[in-house]
Image (cartoon, rainbow, N blue to C red):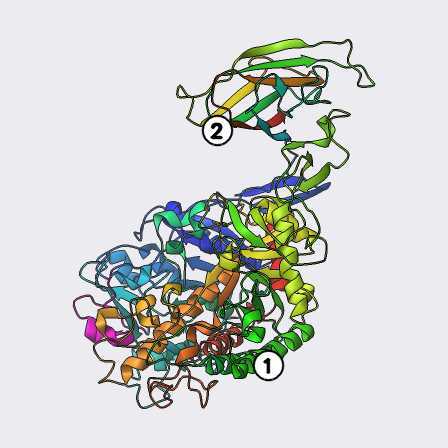
Amino acid sequence: MTIEYSRDDQRTKETVSPSNPLPVRDMGRFVDMLLIATTNLFPTGERDLLGLTNPDLPTLDGCGQYRKLIWFYFRERSSTTSYTIQARATDHNGAPLATGWLTIASGTLPGASDPNASYWGRLEIPATGDAYYDQYRIVVNRTGDPGYQLISKIVGVR
Amino acid sequence: MPPKVCLITRNLTSLHKAWTQVLRHLGIDYTICVATSGSANATIQTPQGAFAATSADLQGYFRQFDAVILCDHAVTLSATAVINYSVYWLSWNAPEDPPFLLFNPHFSTAITESAYNSNFPSDFPIVRPNPSNLGGTLYAADGGSPSSGTPLWANYFEARGACVQFVTENIRAHVMTVCNAHGVNPFSNVVPYFWRLNTTQHNTLSNTPYTHRVARNGRAGEILAVPAPPTNPEDTETYGADCVVAYRYKNIFWLPHTLASMPFTISFWNFHRSDTLAPMLFWLLYGLQVAGVRPRYKLPVQIETDHPIESTDNTPPFDFTLKQQMEVLLAKFDYMRDFARRRNTAIINGVRVGGKTRLPTARHFHWVMMYGTNVPADARAVAQQVNEILVAGHKEGTLPCGIHDHSIGTGAGYWTMNVHANFRRHSGMRYGTPNNIPIARGRCCVAPHVLPAGVAPPDALTVRIGDTELVEWDHTMSGTGDTFNLPMGNIHAARVIIESEIEEMLALGFPDGYCAGHKYTNTAGNNSGGECYWQALKEFGFRGVRSGSACNVPLSIKRTTPNRLWHGFHLLTDRGFDLAAPDVVYARGLYYPGSPADGDAVRFWRLDHGNDISTNWSTDSTAAWRAYRRTVCQFIGHWLYTTVALLGAFYFHPINGAMIVSLSDPNARFDGWSIPNAILQPHYNHAVELLENMDAVVRLLPDVLYWGTITDVMDHRERVMG
């Protein structure tokens, strides 16, 4: 069929069909890639996904535009590992409103029952509702054996 | 007025996507109308309403178009209703009526519908096929042997050949030609046919004045094309004087088969499947031209070679020395350079780099054939002459050369392994020895806008891939040596690999590694490697590369984007045509009795219909001509499809057919057994035949095709895909 529509302030006619639909403009991506990291979990002890142990340093900053973060990960082993996701808001200069963090999720990082098995995982941050926090600290701590590399990808959803 | 055609089909779900794809690429607007059945009583559903097939409303509706195209075709001559509704249109012959294009039309005497038979024009000059009297109403074509399936479904393999004489243009061209097809079973052992002319009716029509813009001769009837008479008495495959393959009856064009209706051909995803390839597109292009549909755009025809200099092992009786192999390549590239000059095209060549740094004794590499101490001096001397032709051709624009690296990964190119063990890099430049460079993505990679202050160390790098930017640190480094294990799936690996390839091109005498102003190359194994390689290629100045859809085989964890235009970077669909399969190393001939499986064109492209080549090869000289005809038709079909439907890149390997040419006259055209090659079989030069046969097609279709360059292809992709 023929459809008339506006394009750059001009009225345009197009003959459309299932194989020739109206052209659409890419209005931008709604998901941004924020982080790709390989975290060395052969050592034990708390560290964030970037391997940092300083408890006041965020893993990600400037995230106020994101409704949600999606954390994809691949575990080379499924050894028992705890995780803690902390978040906080900043002022207009980007300074945290106060020291410390709000823990928004924690638990055992999902993995296979066999500690020697590899495992793909996905976690939503937060699990329900919207986030819009400015800073996140994502901490992992291997407590079981054996050690392994945790490979993570985090995307921000606007 | 922009060109506009009307497509008529009965079933949208089996309408081949190439109908609309080709028209879009040509800049021809189209409207699709759906017939409610194949009967003469069908209603034609148009955007302006549903009209009876015989109605004046429909006739008036059609008059807005430059042509009306019937997309449905005969499958078996015993069918009773395929396009019976079109019978009325055969009498819509006024100057205001559009031309009608019918491809492989179903008009056999098996049609029982009285409305069809009573309205079929009594002066129609082509004998209606009778499935009970095939020999009396048709000519069995191309040797008359049956295809194993149906020739209408021939896509990747199994071409049926015809050398066609185009009467008015006075041009002979090899194009796959099946006017109608028939078998007891419509899908197996089906024979292709040409039509018989009713010469009395034709004589009357050809003397009857007729005024319509498509009547070039001012007459009501015109023979457009017939089987071309043989050029050599060895070829005894001839047809009667009343045999015809294309005809204009008033404003009605009766044309051979072009696009098969199949259920999965409409799907975009299936479009790259080899079994949706449509090698008979010539007749659509020809039909549009003779119907006077003037496309907004002509389409550029170009060709590429992979490995302009390489050598190959060969076995008796093909005992070509390395020097002889280089001499054949020298002759081929001398010819190709001259052809490109004459036709104003640019023949792209993917230089097999990697021999200088990584595989210095491998004789199938360009550098090694020129400089390897394990290559005889006489062969090296000829290889260097070939290189001189390539460098000169590169600089003048006739033979642009680019990187093409089989020395990395599994040998199949970019990112074909997770880790290339003991990778050897070049020296100097930015990523060469002794620079200590990152060779894998950083352990930490964070988008700059969410990177906390103070986290990234001072030596962190910012890496951009497409529209993603990440700050990386804690990289695996190369050290200062020239050998290390290289993880291949990252931009740092891509950079060091590509720079080493360009370094070799410069050392070979080329001013660049990306085909000069075309900023393009054809990738080894058609593996473009994925986003990191595309980004790195962009950084080195490339505009596009040839790429398979699965672009890192055999690792096989990538697919290129469906539209193959990634952030302005072109990924051109590959389509290759050699005479033999890669695993048999070299072609033994069009056909050679002692060939291994897939070792000659007839075996590899499955052209031995009914064994009518293999059983007669040594006793009937016609068999060689049959093999030639089918081979040429097959590659013309593939090349045209690549050009007009895929806007892709068609290529061949010059060394593949090197052992079957005459050493005394390497650039001679095929002439059956009259010109023997080194083992006293028919001489055949693939480079010459590709270009000369396509040249005939380009000359036939000046409104649609022109000899162009890969830049023209990429420009046009941006025009119609952007």
Q: Is residue B162 above or below residue B522?
A: below
The Cα atoms of the two marked residues, 2 and 1, are separated by: 54 Å
Q: In this rendering, does residue B220 appear at all? A: no
Q: Is residue A110 left or right of residue B349?
A: left
Kind of residue at badge 2: Glu
Pick the residue in front: B392 or B363: B363
Foreground: disc 2 or disc 1: 2
Whole-percent x, y for residue B644 in the image: 51, 61
Pick the residue in front: B556 or B667: B556
Q: Which residues are magenta?
A: B126-148
Kind of residue at badge 1: Gln
Q: Is residue A78 left or right of residue B25?
A: left
Where on the picture, by quarter, is residue B343? bottom right
Crowd tier of the residue under label 1, counting other residues whose Cα lies within 10 Å: few below 14, some 14–19, many 20 or above: some
Secondary-structure class at tag 1: helix
Residue found 37% across the figure and 55% down from its top: B275
Secondary-structure class at tag 2: loop
Query: The N terminus of chain B appears in which quarter of the rendering?
Result: bottom right
Whole-percent x, y for residue B10 in the image: 36, 49
Q: Are marks 2 and 1 on the same chain?
A: no
Whole-percent x, y for residue B373 in the image: 55, 74
Q: Mark 1 sits on what residue?
A: B385
Q: Is residue A23 left or right of residue B685?
A: right
In the image as oriented, which residue stretches furthest toward the right?
A93
Residue found 32% across the figure and 76% down from its top: B627
Q: In this rendering, does residue B385 appear at all? A: yes
Residue B128, magenta (yes or no): yes
Whole-percent x, y for residue B55 in the image: 40, 52
Q: Mark 2 sits on what residue?
A: A76
Q: Is residue B19 above or below residue A84?
A: below
Crowd tier of the residue under label 2, counting other residues whose Cα lies within 10 Å: few below 14, some 14–19, many 20 or above: many
